[in-house]
């Protein structure tokens, strides 16, 4: 087990959240919902302030106290307010915010986003990737403005107005740009042919950066927000509706928008103050929900804020000081290290701490100097002070010495007193299950020894038998079950989807031929389609 000044607090953050989710107890609760039926139409409304009760009976008692009951009853429109509001376009990208965005859009890992971004930088299409700021200087703003029409032409967005040609402090701030500025397009605009040669992730990154940059020059998104308050005896109901007035920068993003806003509130009918309405009040049964596990995108944000509960890039800049752990250049690598050491794994884009990772966390959780994200952030902060000549190396190293001495003194005793029983049992069970899955059956070639699954190949354990079965066939990684079927039954029980050939993806049953090589067997329908595709180029077709 290895520890690290940044990797261990990062692992512990994931572990803490995972434990919180594991121990979460769902609890039912009841709240009210009403349909308000007015002269010009009906709309939904909620109690204001919202009221919840543990049981339906308790909720109904609450309504009776307020002079109302479930079902239909008369009400009055108490207040109607319409306010014009606006929303600025998203901030320019730092590396962290870009990694979070691409994880959200493409389920891309932080490492993959950085590597794809690096390729675009080396191709001179995007600016330097390892930046921690969303700001540019007036110099960058000037060249972006000069090339604005070219960027719009690439995005096929010539019709979208971009009349804002004066630097806005939301994006342009000379004082907040230190070593590097935000991720923006360069003066070299990519051709359509060059764009086609990019990977899907690089294409998505390039489009996102261009859209976010062009949005800086577009009008704000404006909308009218209408709030209707309905009175029923002693209860007030509230409904909010949005009507877009001018989509502005949102036209660049289409349905995707900026990825943060909720769906638009519904359009409300025209009502007037004092209007009599019918209110149909119902009770809804709901249950509390556990927090969401980390994805690589949300973990990057958590590392940047040292675990503070800040869930948006916008909110980070409201905080006066953010003492993050790691840097823009290292955070992706830290996540990869945790994967390589098998402390964490990714399941359906969610980060999961493995049994090995849990063991490590249990071993060090009594020592905050090893697990505290805030402690690590303070180290980062002091290193910056040294760089600014506001701190000294001597002081820093003296504290490191105290830190190491303290760990050597107290941690062995803490580990000694920790009970790893249940986790070790899970580790043993998982290990035995994994080992059992490696044994695929008697070798079909020698009919004597067993075939064992290794990382990239299944092979016979006999020294004289040369049987091998590759785990990846037609660019598709097969499961242990599928490999076992091929070895024991000479074929997969079901057609395998996602196989790839020269003409794209296909589906087929993988079979083991008489010469112990693999081939494909197609269903009758697939054979017919295959014949149609190949009739002009071949005289005969083999299906295995």
Image (tube, rainbow, N blue to C red):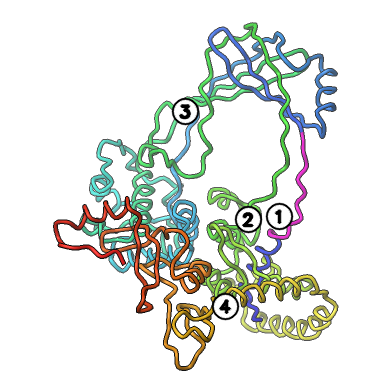
Choose mark 3 or mark 4, whichever is in front: 4
Residue 336 spot, x, y in % from top left:
52, 71
Q: Eyeballing the image, is 525 above or below 133?
A: above
Tag 2's secondary structure?
loop
Residue 504 spot, x, y in % from top left:
29, 58
Residue 233 visible, this orientation: yes
Identify the image quadrant of the N terminus.
bottom right
Tell me, yes or no, whether the two marked residues, 1 and 3, touch with CB atoms within 8 Å: no
Mark 3 to mark 2 CA distance (whole Å): 34 Å
- Could you say which disc has been placed on residue 439 in the image? 4
For this rendering, which residue is in front, 54 or 304?
54
Q: Residues within 10 Å of mark 1 (few under 14, many from 20)?
A: some
Residue 360 visible, this orientation: no
Q: Residues within 10 Å of mark 3 (few under 14, many from 20)?
A: some
Q: Which residue range is magenta in the image?
A: 17-29
Tag 3's secondary structure?
strand
Q: Which residue is mark 2?
A: 293
Q: Earlier in the sequence, mark 1 or mark 3?
A: 1
Tell me, yes or no, whether the two marked residues, 1 and 2, touch with CB atoms within 8 Å: yes
Q: Eyeballing the image, is 311 above or below 31?
A: below
Q: Which residue is mark 3?
A: 223
- The quarter of the picture where residue 186 lies is bottom left
């Amino acid at each position: 087990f290895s520890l690290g000044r940044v990797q261990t607090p990062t692992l512990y953050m994931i572990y803490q959240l995972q434990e919180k989710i594991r121990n979460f107890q769902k609890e039912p609760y009841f709240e009210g919902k009403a349909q308000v039926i007015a002269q010009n139409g009906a709309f939904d409304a909620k109690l204001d302030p919202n009221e919840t009760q543990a049981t339906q009976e308790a909720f109904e008692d609450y309504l009776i106290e307020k002079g109302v009951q479930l079902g239909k009853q008369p009400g009055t429109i108490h207040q109607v307010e319409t306010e014009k509001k606006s929303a600025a376009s998203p901030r320019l990208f730092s590396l962290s915010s870009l990694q979070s965005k691409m994880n959200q859009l493409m389920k891309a890992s932080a490492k993959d986003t950085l590597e794809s971004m690096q390729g675009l930088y080396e191709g001179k299409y995007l600016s330097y990737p390892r930046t921690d700021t969303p700001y540019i200087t007036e110099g960058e703003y000037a060249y972006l403005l000069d090339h604005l029409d070219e960027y719009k032409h690439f995005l096929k967005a010539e019709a979208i107005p971009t009349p804002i040609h004066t630097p806005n402090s939301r994006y342009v701030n000379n004082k907040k740009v230190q070593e590097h500025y935000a991720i923006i397009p360069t003066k070299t605009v990519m051709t359509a042919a060059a764009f086609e040669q990019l990977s899907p992730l690089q294409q998505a990154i390039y489009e996102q950066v261009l859209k976010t940059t062009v949005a800086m020059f577009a009008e704000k998104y404006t909308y009218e927000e209408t709030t209707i308050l309905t009175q029923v005896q002693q209860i007030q109901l509230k409904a909010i509706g949005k009507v877009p007035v001018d989509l502005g920068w949102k036209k660049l993003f289409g349905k995707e928008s900026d990825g943060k806003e909720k769906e638009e509130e519904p359009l409300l009918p025209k009502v007037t103050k004092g209007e009599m309405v019918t209110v149909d009040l119902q009770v809804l049964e709901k249950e509390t929900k556990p927090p969401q596990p980390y994805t690589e995108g949300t973990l990057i944000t958590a590392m940047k804020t040292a675990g503070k509960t800040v869930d948006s890039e916008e909110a980070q800049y409201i905080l006066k000081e953010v003492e993050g752990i790691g840097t823009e250049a290292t955070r992706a690598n830290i996540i990869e290290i945790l994967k390589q050491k098998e402390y964490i794994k990714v399941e359906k884009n969610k980060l999961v701490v493995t049994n090995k990772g849990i063991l490590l966390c249990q071993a060090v959780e009594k020592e905050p100097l090893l697990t505290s994200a805030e402690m690590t952030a303070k180290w980062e902060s002091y290193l910056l002070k040294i760089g600014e000549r506001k701190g000294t190396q001597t002081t820093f190293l003296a504290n490191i010495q105290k830190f190491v001495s303290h760990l050597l003194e107290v941690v062995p005793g803490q580990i000694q007193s920790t009970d790893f029983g249940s986790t070790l049992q899970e580790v043993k069970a998982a290990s035995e299950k994994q080992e059992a899955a490696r044994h695929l059956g008697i070798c079909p070639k020698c009919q004597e020894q067993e075939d064992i699954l290794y990382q990239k190949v299944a092979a016979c354990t006999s020294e004289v038998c040369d049987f091998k079965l590759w785990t990846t066939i037609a660019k598709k990684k097969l499961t242990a079950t599928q490999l076992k079927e091929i070895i024991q039954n000479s074929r997969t029980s079901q057609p395998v989807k996602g196989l790839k050939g020269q003409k794209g993806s296909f589906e087929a049953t993988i079979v083991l031929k008489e010469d112990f090589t693999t081939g494909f067997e197609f269903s009758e329908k697939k054979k017919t389609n295959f014949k149609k595709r190949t009739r002009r180029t071949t005289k005969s077709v083999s299906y295995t």
